[in-house]
Amino acid sequence: MKTHYRVIVAFLLLAFGSEPGRTQQPAPAAPMPPNLQNYKPVTAERLRKPDDGDWLMVRRTYDGWGYSPLAQITRASVTQLQPLWVMATGVTNGHEAAPIVNNGVMFVATPGNQLMAIEARSGEVFWRFTRPLADDVIRMHPTTRGVALYGDRVFFASGEAVLVALDARTGKEVWTTKVDENKSGYYLSVAPLVVDGKVLIGTSGGEFGIRGFVAAYDANTGKELWKSYTIPAPGEPGSDTWPQGDQWKTGGGPAWVTGNYDPETNLVFWGTGNAGPWMGDQRPGDNLYTSSTIALDVATGRLKGYFQYHPNDSWDWDEVSPPILVDYRRNDRTIKGLINVARNGYLWFLERTDGPIRFNEGVPYVKQNVFSSLDPRTGRPNVDPARKPGTGRKADFCPSWWGGKNWPSVAYSPQTRMIYIPANENLCATMEGRAIQYTPGRNFIGATTTLYLAPGADHIGEVQAWNVDTGKRVWTHTFAKSTNWGPILATGGGLVFSGGTSDRKFRAFDALTGAVLWEFPTSSGIIGQPVSFMVEGRQYIAVQSGWGIDARTMQSRLARLSADFSPVPEGGAIWVFGLGVGASRPSQ
Amino acid sequence: MRGRFERRTFLKAGIGFGVGLRLADPSIAAQEDPASIRPTEGDLLVRLGDSSATPLGPDDIPLSARPTMAWAMDPADKTVRSGSRLNQLLLVRLDPVTLTPETLSRAAEGVVAYTAICTHEGCDIDDWLADKQHLSCACHFSTFDPKDSGRVVEGPALRMLPALPLKVVDAKLVVAKPFTSRVGFGEPPL
Ligand code: FES
């Protein structure tokens, strides 16, 4: 009780007492806090093999597992988990970013082009940075999914398509690089990824007729090193899949979720979004490399391999979530694997090499009525034409355009050898296309949609656990009255943490059985990526709570169908949990 | 929310560090560009994507149909005000008897003009609900009534769509007055 009271007071003070943005730059005379004076530079080696207590990149490790080996918080002790500090971010809308923690210093990015450095243990704010935006900035999804660290710098992909490097100690800009033209619909929401001194990002803007790309910048100078388009120009391999005129120039294929990386082959595996405009019959061909995973050589940016989850997308199924790198067993063989939970409703077990991506198997993990079968050799789906919307042709399909799983990240635990999936089951859609003309900076969609619940549906949101060696589902937790938009964290304590539901709760599941061991209602709905870290021998769990973006849009669509889907309270906050009582020491 | 504190931050930073505010503020810089300033009294209207920039007349706008997208154009030097996405206009032609008196006073032979920028979070409004003759935003499904001053029929938008009063001069649609309220979304910048 006492702890709760203290937390609430702190929350109110921060919510109403602070004025975000007033102090963009700290007064130069202020002494630098010891944590920043002793800031531990992030090396290539530390990114490759982080200390157990750190969370240095968006999914913690290059393989994308979202797994912390920390085991102080266990299945038994998690029932004692308490909020230790909480802080209002001062902004609304969807808070999706993972808090990144380096040796006790936490970096949190929020909507509103805001970034804060915080003492991870106490919640004391070291510095706060915001970048002003023009009134007419184009950002269909005004959020950020986090920052990257390297050396003594923090890299932030600013909404208006500018990459920013900040001094981690002061929050001051070191360099900025314009990534592309915002007026033409390019914008950024991705968390950058640092590999070998290069800062990698992918663009957003798939609904504005962009030509998607992944690009790399020199971490020291901000100079562009390469820019690899997700759509080939005429004459390049794959360009024959865009046979009609200049459609490749406006064909979409954004890349707004951070890729995963294999140090052995120096390949980064990045997901690409759907082609644009939405109706496939308006852009004949397979439309490579949209709705795919692409393997890029980090040294050159050259495409070494790809896997397209479905050709000629007509359902708005972005396949931007990258596959995680997990070696799995099949028929007495260990496969160097790539596992991807696709928006199209299939779970894909693939194989990585030093170039091509090989298909192994694909199974639906939610109701999927669009693919009648997969080619057993290539994995290419056979699409039921009745389930494919077109121009002036309405079609009815499951899962909806939001997919069986949208961007929220899966997690993998090497202890249980299971992957954990935040899924939405029983959501189907109708879609009908119309002709649309490309105008720079305007929506380039051309479709009208409705969302509906599959007949007999008794729930929507799910957390699913699948064993990677059997390829079979082990457990499913269902949410009767909520969708699930919660990225997942797995820990060495045998736990899985996730929010994602409209009741604002943050939960801990038993990783083996799916039993809910602990839950706590936070300030808003959680669509942020949870993390775990350790400072001075104490394990913490951190997550941003702040409902918005597509979770909210889906909620407002569902509100038309049922009174169960009322609006979720909004307003961002950072929550940090641990065992025991209170923040560990008074603020200095 | 976003606009407010970011702008305030900028002012503070700009004054504190002696930055030339007028040059550095992206929104103020844009306001000085004739292609980016909001439509002005006397402007003609041209269809979005029309490279010949032919001024539109009331008869170019089909009755009770999906909106026609347009930009304003300076009649003197033919500058099309397409420099800011906030200048995108929706033109709808409706039966004048269905218009409220206020909307009728802004209409030119039944043609009404509104911003195409949703007041909720700034998406392009591009859906037309033909049965009710409402405008709808595909992002979060705010619905607006063009017959009644752009009133919010269904949220989450809270603010009506700013209207652009029109008149007819020499058989062409001409801007009669500036927008009835601030174009854009969120709270007004300080
Ligand atoms: S931006 Fe139009 S309803 Fe949200």
Image (cartoon, helix red, strand yellow):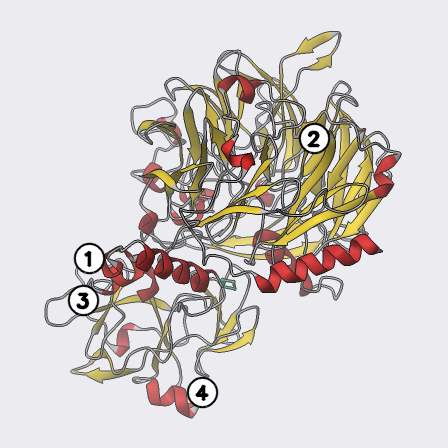
Seen in the picture, residue B55 relative to A238 is either above or below; the reply is below
Name which quarter of the figure residue A470 lies in: top right
What chain does badge 1 belong to? B
Q: Which residue is mark 1?
A: B51
Q: Is residue A322 left or right of residue A150?
A: right
Q: Chain of mark 4?
A: B
Q: Residue at x 57, y 71 (%)?
A: B155
- Of callouts 4 and 1, which one flags the residue occurring earlier in the amino acid sequence? 1
Q: Where is residue A4 shown, x and y percent of the image? A: 79, 55
Q: Is residue A33 left or right of residue B24?
A: right
Alpha carbon of mark 2 to alpha carbon of mark 1: how far? 65 Å
Given contact means CB atoms under 8 Å apart, are the residues at marks 3 and 2 in contact?
A: no
For mark 3, what is the residue? B54
Q: Which residue is mark 4?
A: B98
The local secondary structure at tag 2 comes to loop
The x, y position of residue A159, in whole percent, is 42, 47
Badge 3 and badge 2 in a common chain? no
Please tell me whether mark 3 or mark 2 is closer to you in this view.
2
For mark 2, what is the residue?
Answer: A536
